[in-house]
Image (spheres, rainbow, N blue to C red):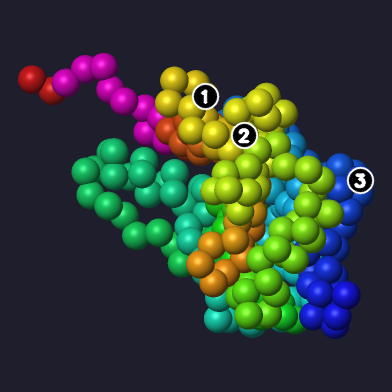
Amino acid sequence: MNKTLLAAAIVIAAAPMAAAAQALPDASAQQSAGGAVATTPAFPLDVAGVRLGMSAGEARAALVKAGYAMPATNGVSYGPSFAARVRAEAARRRTGAASSRAMADRVMTQLQGVGPNREAITVGLTAAPSGGSSVTSVYLQMPQDVMKGDAFLRQVTAKYGQPDGRRDQGMTLNWCSAPLKSVCGSITPFQRRPEALPNLKASVIYNDNTIRLADGTDQDRERERVFAAAVERAAPGTERAAF
């Protein structure tokens, strides 16, 4: 194995599969405003040490440990906190006019880094009801002129184990949450889709090697439900019109 593959192994295989199942972030239950709990099934896989449910600080620390350069400002994005979103939507409901969100009340929504072998990583975060933000997606991209696709997929399999599903003549490998492993990597028009729960996909496409770790659509819907419930508590709808 040459120096390039050794360095890539440090980045992508920073934690073996057995260790990944330990010390998971507490993403199984996030306390929302008003006491509702949004549940997220724990998903043990990571990309460069970053797992779903991590806080922004935990994600940054994991990337630094994996050898990524973290720009101080470029590549970092912020958005309104959960509480700020609720206040703005509640005000709009009461008055019909959008209110400005306090710039001070914001949380990190994106974090980018550059690895030692031109790996580019983007961490997406979503405002959490309990405050701050948590990781909901991770995307890694690495050019094939640095590491060939077959070597990349071998390293991916060494880190995550045999995939639950394959597509594109074996050039796309999929790992799914336990309830959906049987349909992982397949097109299921009349069944629950694999993307409904947290999943990971590694692909060799065009000139790039990629890994995408993401929350499922079930988690997206649950976040919207928790947000709508918080807005309803802040600005309840009326049952009587003025006429």
Q: Residues within 10 Å of mark 2 (few under 14, many from 20)?
A: many
Q: Earlier in the sequence, mark 3 or mark 2?
A: 3
* Dot 3 crowding, Cα within 10 Å, few <14, some 14–19, many 20+: few
> Mark 1 = which residue?
192
Residue 74, quarter of picture: bottom right
Q: CA distance from mark 3 to mark 2?
A: 21 Å
**What percent of the width, then of the height, locates residue 211?**
64, 58
Residue type for callout 2: Cys
Q: What amino acid is found at the position of numbered circle 1 in the picture?
A: Arg
Q: Is residue 146 above or below residue 243?
A: below
The residue to which callout 3 is attached is: 18
Q: Position of residue 214 (x, y in %)?
A: 60, 48
Marks 2,1: beta carbons within 8 A: no
Examine the structure image and report whether residue 71 is included in the region drawn in magenta.
no
Quick one: label 1 or label 3, which is nearer the N terminus?
A: 3
Mark 2 lies on residue: 184
Name which residue type carries label 3.
Ala
- Label 1: which secondary element: loop
Task: Please state, as top left, top right, bottom left or bottom right, where the N terminus lies in the image.
Answer: bottom right
Callout 3: SS: helix
Q: Position of residue 164 (x, y in %)?
A: 70, 37
Where are the magenta residues, as a range? 231-241
Mark 2 vs mark 1: which is more N-terminal? 2
Q: Residue at x 68, y 71 (%)?
A: 148
Is residue 238 or residue 46 the one in the foreground? 46
Residue 108 visible, this orientation = no
- The residue under the point 74% across, 37% down is 42
